[in-house]
Amino acid sequence: MDVIIDALARFPVKGLSGQPLKSVSLESGQGFPCDRQFGFARPNSGFDPNDPQPLPKSKFYVLARDSALALLDTEYNDQTGILSVSAPQASGQFDITTTEGKQNASEFLKSYLSLPDDETPHLYEASPHRFTDVSVVSTEMMNAVSVINLESVLEFSKAIGQDVDPQRFRGNIHISGLPPFAELEMIERHIAVGSVRLKIVQRTKRCPATEVNLNTGERDLKTRKLLHENYGHMDMGVYAEVLQGGVLSQGDVVEFL
C-alpha cells in the first residue's frame, strides 16, 4: 500500500483556523508559505516586530487557553492582504498589511472574546519570523513543517472508542498508508515526495489545544491524558525540515528513505 499525501493545510494566523491547499511550493530551510505568519499577542507580551524573538504560546491568544477561537472561520488572501473572519454572530474583513487593518482585526477579536477594556490583543507580523510553537527551540524548528499520520489518529480513535478529528492536531501535511505511529520512530529519516526532500527531526508533543472540539469550541477530549494512558507518551505527529524544495500536491506518493 502506497503512502500518500491525503491533505495539505496552512495556518496563516497562530491559533486560528487553517486553510486547505491542493498543492504547495516549498523552499529549502523554510516552512509552509504563509503558515503562522501572524499572531495575536496578549498585552505586554514583549514581542518586538523590529527585533522578533520567539515567545512561548502563553504570550498569544491560542486554542490552548482560548477554546472559543475554534468557532472562528478565517481565511487569508496573501495576494490582497485581506483577512476574513466569521464568528457565530459577526464577521469582518481586514487589510492586515496596514496598521489600521491590524488594529481593527485586534478589536474584532477583543469583542468576540469579550475581553476587558484594559486587555486588547495586538496582531503582529514580522516575516520571516513565524509564530510556531517550536520557534522557541531553534530557527530551524521555527521553519519546520508538521506531519500527521492519519493511521495514527485512526488507531487512537479505536483505542479510546471515540472518533478523533485529525484537524485537532493542526498539521501541515496529512499522510495515509503508513502503519500507526511508525512516524514516531523515524527521527532523522528522510522523506521524498517527487523532488522534495524532508527530514523528520522531532516528535510532536501535544498541548491542551487538542482537547478542543473544533465544531463546538468545547474541551471534550483529554487528548494528552488518553495518549499517555494508551501509549505511554503524549505525541501525535512529527516535525520535518525542508532539505530540498519543490511542489507537494494532494495524492502524491511519499517515500521514506
Image: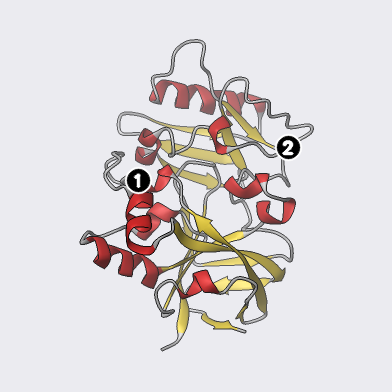
Location of residue 235 in the rendering, given as x and y in whole percent from the top left corner: 46, 59
Nearer-N-terminus badge (2/1): 2
Other-residue count near label 1 (Cα within 10 Å), few / some / many at <14 / 14–19 / ≥20? many
Q: Nearer the viewer, residue 185 or 103?
A: 185
Residue at image location 39% in from the left, 25% down from the top: 112
| In this view, 2 is above or below 143 | below
Tell me the element at label 2. Answer: loop
| In this view, 81 is above or below 10 | above
Residue 143 bears which disc, if any? none
Q: Nearer the viewer, residue 157 or 110?
A: 157
Residue at image location 47% in from the left, 39% down from the top: 84
Residue 78 visible in the current orientation? no
User: What's the residue type where badge 2 is placed?
Assistant: Gln
- Disc 2 to disc 1, how far (Cα)? 28 Å
Q: Quadrant of the C terminus?
A: bottom right
Residue 191, image quadrant: bottom right
Tell me the element at label 1. Answer: helix
Residue at image location 32% in from the left, 68% down from the top: 154
Residue 85, image quadrant: top left
| In this view, 177 is above or below 68 | below
Q: Please name the residue that numbered disc 2 is placed on.
A: 53
Judge left or right: residue 182 versus residue 229.
right
In the image, farthest residue toward the bottom: 1
User: What's the residue type where badge 1 is placed?
Assistant: Glu
Location of residue 226 in the rendering, given as x and y in whole percent from the top left corner: 32, 54
Residue 61 visible in the current orientation? yes
Tell me whether the residue at label 2 lies in contact with that at label 1, contact meaning CB atoms closer than 8 angstroms. no
Residue 211 bears which disc, if any? 1
Residue at image location 35% in from the left, 29% down from the top: 90
